[in-house]
Amino acid sequence: MFCKILSGGIAGVSACFVWVEVDMDRGLPCFSMVGSLGSGVRESRERVSVALKNTGFAMPAARVTVNLAPADVRKEGTAFDLPIAIGILQAMSYFPGTAAENILFLGELGLNGELKKVHGVLPIVQAAAAGGVRQCIVPEANAGEGAVIPGIAVRGASSISQVLDFLQQGSGEEQERILPRTVTDAEKLLKTQERCEEDFEQVNGQELAKRAAEIAAAGFHNLLMTGPPGAGKSMIARRIPGILPPLTVKESLEVTGIYSVAGLLEGGQALVTARPFQNPHHTVSRSALVGGHAQPKPGLISLSHRGILFMDELPEFGKAVIDSMRQPLEEHRVRIARAGGNVTYPADFMLVCAMNPCPCGYFPDRNRCRCSETQIQRYKSRVSGPIVDRIDLWVELQAVELSRLQGACREESSGLIRRRVEGARARQQERFAQTGYRFNADIRAEDMERFCPLGAGERRVMDQIYRSLQLGARAYHRVLKVARTIADLAGEESIREEHLLEASAYRPGEV
């Protein structure tokens, strides 16, 4: 007997339909699987056989062939256990042939028949809903994650026996009793998210750095802070998520899809509701940062999508690791090529970096710094020019005055800064409607005249800035984009001279 069961697979963070074809015929007893299978899928044969036996369904003495189509798409993971088992049970006539129509099955089987959590449920359910599939049966631990997608009934099951009972029932009411539909309200979840506990009012002094952080958050610009140890670089970086606007439903689904594919959603977690903040150690490998491995999966860059990637002590990272960010910073995506195929991961993140001015951290204070000029230059050269060129804002922190540490002045809270950031974001949203851009940092060179026009006086100022700072073409455009964000924060429609001068002050000097 031949039957087909619908399932789904993952390529990058995108999903595709996979048909599990099962044929059971007379012949020498065997269980073979074909269809470009990874190691985890090949092991399904043993898991399914034992799980069916321990659940009370003896495999018949027959020739069983399972094909996962299309055969030219690589299949990875353990989510095909459930559809394979359902296909075999249908071939054994345990339920009517029409009962599994228009239902997508996902799940890993334990040896006792229980259903275990799998990766990538959200993008697969999203693709199923777009493809007109009516129902999806997944493990209970994944039900909330899949249920955030509207237009499809997602049901969470705890075992293969429960799924079989569902398929054997003809009435909708009885099926609903066995496997009730899971409902998750994405908008309600996002409204209940907790704000960042770390507040800018806890940061004493450092107005210039806090201003740079506000500009970076408003226009989604990359930021680098340099200064001696203890100046507050890490403290400021960790508070930037608190001044970013909350995730929208669309952004939350994008981020959750990445975390779902990477297997980083906690048990029962339906959505990622807070903007990502990734802070890798400087010993991180290139593949861990960018993504890759023998079986590609999202790296920390992609896990920072719609959020922040904070690289503390930037020169301590490997030079190859730092330079690997060139393409993602420009294209907002990561492309990984392997012999088995190519995958693309989203990587639209805000890069925030911190570094010391020298190996010991105290240059130019020669009372404390003992580094030679050679050591200082070698330390700075670990950050290549092309990476520096891709950083919009460069700010230097100084030691905080004692009066500020003693609380003589009241500092501005993250809530007040966030309101200004949200106002600037609203102006960008109106400006970039129907353009494909989201933030000022996204503006391409060919559209600079359209979105960052300059008057005669502003052109003269920009000419002076260009010559005095010896800017390249990319740095010139970045000054304009930062000035556009400063104007948005000020509520100005046009870029003025003071905006250009402030933006130029955030360009690095000698590196």
Image: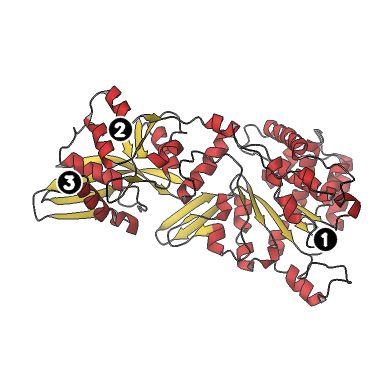
Of the residues under marks 1 and 2, which one precedes in the sequence? 2
Circle 3 or circle 1, nearest the eye? 3
The residue identified by callout 1 is 509
The image quadrant that residue 107 belongs to is: top left
Q: Is residue 80 left or right of residue 50?
A: right
Which quadrant, please, contains the C terminus? bottom right
Disc 3 secondary structure class: strand
Residue 298, given in percent of the width and then of the height, sits at 51, 53
Residue 98, given in percent of the width and then of the height, sits at 22, 31
The image quadrant that residue 154 belongs to is: top left
Depth check, front residue: 494 or 148: 148
Disc 2 secondary structure class: loop
Residue 111, given in percent of the width and then of the height, sits at 27, 51
Question: Which kind of residue does numbered mark 2 sit on?
Answer: Asn
- At x 19% / y 34%, what residue is drawn? 95
Of the residues under marks 3 and 1, which one precedes in the sequence? 3
Q: Residue 405, which numbered label?
A: none
Residue 36, given in percent of the width and then of the height, sits at 31, 55
Q: Residue 102, which numbered label?
A: 2
Question: Which kind of residue does numbered mark 3 sit on?
Answer: Asp
Of the residues under marks 3 and 2, which one precedes in the sequence? 3
Question: Which kind of residue does numbered mark 1 sit on?
Answer: Gly
Q: CA distance from mark 3 to mark 1?
A: 70 Å
Which quadrant, please, contains the N terminus? top left
Depth check, front residue: 333 or 272: 272
- At x 72% / y 63%, what residue is drawn? 385
Q: CA distance from mark 1 to mark 2?
A: 62 Å
